[in-house]
Image: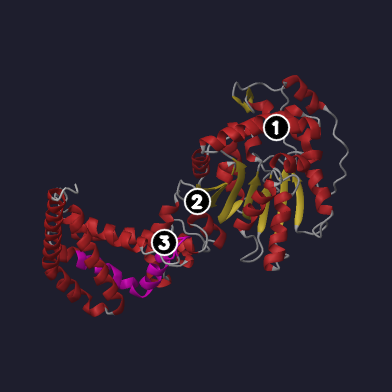
Amino acid sequence: MNSSKLLQLAIPLVKSHGFTREALAQSVLHLPKPHREPLPDLSVTALFGRGDDARRTLVNAWLEDARFRMKEDTSGSTSMRRVLHSRLKLNEPVLAHLPEAFALLSTSSSVLPVDPLPLLKHTALVADQACWIIEPHAQEMSWYTRRASISAMYLAAELHQLTSPNTAESFLDYLLQNSGAAEKAVQEVALFGFYTFKSWKGIAKSSGVL
Amino acid sequence: MLPQLFQCARRPHRQCIVPRLLRNTHDGATPASSKSSGRTTSFGFQTVPEESKESLVKGVFDNVASKYDVMNDASSFGVHRLWKDTFVSTLKPGRKGPMRCIDVAGGTGDIALRILDHAREEYADRETTVEIVDINAQMLGEGFKRFKKTMYHNTPQVSFHEANAQELPMSLFKDNTYDLYTIAFGIRNCTSIPAVLEEAYRVLKPGATFACLEFSKVNNPLMSRLYDQYSFSVIPLMGTILAGDRESYQYLVESIRKFPSQPEFAQMIKDAGFATGAPHDGGAWTDLWGGIACIHTGVKV
């Protein structure tokens, strides 16, 4: 048996136990042939990692499960708004434990005291999955910029949800409505920058520097 | 090389007055008398009938028992102590209450002593027990002698049993009994690794941990070359000088090379019914010193 099966059993326990080693230990009580006692701490270490690494394993498993459920709930949908709303809704049962989960992810690096990369990776994966749900066969020039903008919007909405869960949906709607304007603004800045670069290059060539 | 080893196997035992030794010797077939089943296994780089591996390995360990610890220190420059310290400190015995541990192929008591010391020093636990099991009486004798110098001698915390890891007697080692099963640098000497793993699965309680410390494959090519050079040139030479026995140490070095790689052994542990971590370094196994030694863990679920 893989430890992934026990992780699957631990995910529903996050609501009551949080992202803790206790949730992982209790997972064996929900096997088809349940154990009489939770797993000892040594076994949790052997299967999932030492100390907070086991908790990070659980956090990553929960995030992956949430992406999967987002896909299941909204497959065939063409509305980015609906897809991202469904993902935010999945956060609601475990909202109280999420700040600690993100803190665990951010402190995973052995070099940096605070590492933003795991959190950015989480939002990037959500954005990628959402774009895939809307258009599975998309071939677009703006592949990365679209994902980057959705990822940033989702991150903002999720952080908003942690402090103000009731207004999170309307905040996300506001961001999505204005995203078109933001994307155009970025493109226009990029175009202007390109023109400026070409003109300076032309000046440099005509003055004999290049 | 083989005839010389048979001679070693027939050398009479030294009288080992060890009151706690419970003799449950498996009737290992000698090469001369067994009906060969045709199945073969590796004995170092040689291929031998399966029935004879046990007695050949017995011969090796009869020879090396008295100088085992000295040779370990010399050939690994004392690093084996670090590996064993890491192994036991990873397991943290005694952290959540007394544990019933079984240390298999643990003849000289290195791991057992570390387990008991760790439980006592870190967690003030004097109820954790370790049962040391080894097929070789000489090695058990050395372990018994070592424990006589400690505070655990004549206490229920340690006991010594002569038994075969592939067939632990059911009367002594009942199903679902132990909280921790350890085997350090011993499993590669067993004829059938799956049989050892099945026995480990049988005697462990549900939720308990199997932990194995063993030499393994070095993945870095440069380090692997250096390690091979050192193993095949220096270690048998040390065996000749320090212990007067080149062949036994040649076998020990060859048996390391024949042991399965980390992913293969992790799969064998899973096939025996254990749940393991993900199949990479840091998951189902942890490499020490680039893979020279490796700690594999599994949980009985």
- For marks 3 and 2, give the one nearer the viewer: 2
- For marks 3 and 1, give the one nearer the viewer: 1
Q: Which residue is mark 2?
A: B282
List x then y, in percent, for residue A183. Answer: 14, 63
Decide whether residue A105 is among the magenta residues. Answer: yes
What kind of colouring is applied to the model shown? secondary structure
Is A157 in front, or is B15?
Answer: A157
- Can you say whether A169 is above or below B69 in the image? below
Q: Secondary structure at mark 3?
A: helix
- Can you say whether B224 is above or below B36 in the image? below
- Residue range in magenta is A84-112
Is B141 in front, or is A142?
Answer: A142
Q: Which residue is mark 1?
A: B234
Mark 1 neighbour class, 10 Å CA radius: few under 14, some 14 to 19, many 20 or more: few
* Alpha carbon separation for disc pair 3 and 1: 46 Å
* Alpha carbon separation for disc pair 3 and 2: 16 Å
Question: Residues at marks 3 and 1, common chain?
Answer: no
The kind of residue tagged 1 is: Val
Give the position of the N terminus of chain B as an image quadrant. top right
Q: Quadrant of residue B22?
A: top right
Which residue is found at the position 59% from the left and 31% from the top?
Answer: B258
List x then y, in percent, for residue A201. Answer: 15, 52
* Alpha carbon separation for disc pair 2 and 1: 31 Å
Decide whether residue B255 is among the magenta residues. Answer: no
Which residue is found at the position 58% from the left and 45% from the top?
Answer: B289
- Dominant SS of magenta comes to helix
Q: Which residue is mark 3?
A: A58
The kind of residue tagged 3 is: Leu
Which numbered disc, 2 or 1, marks the residue that appears first in the sequence?
1
Q: Verify CB contact (< 8 Å) between mark 2 and mark 1.
A: no
Question: Residues at marks 3 and 2, common chain?
Answer: no
Q: Secondary structure at mark 1?
A: helix
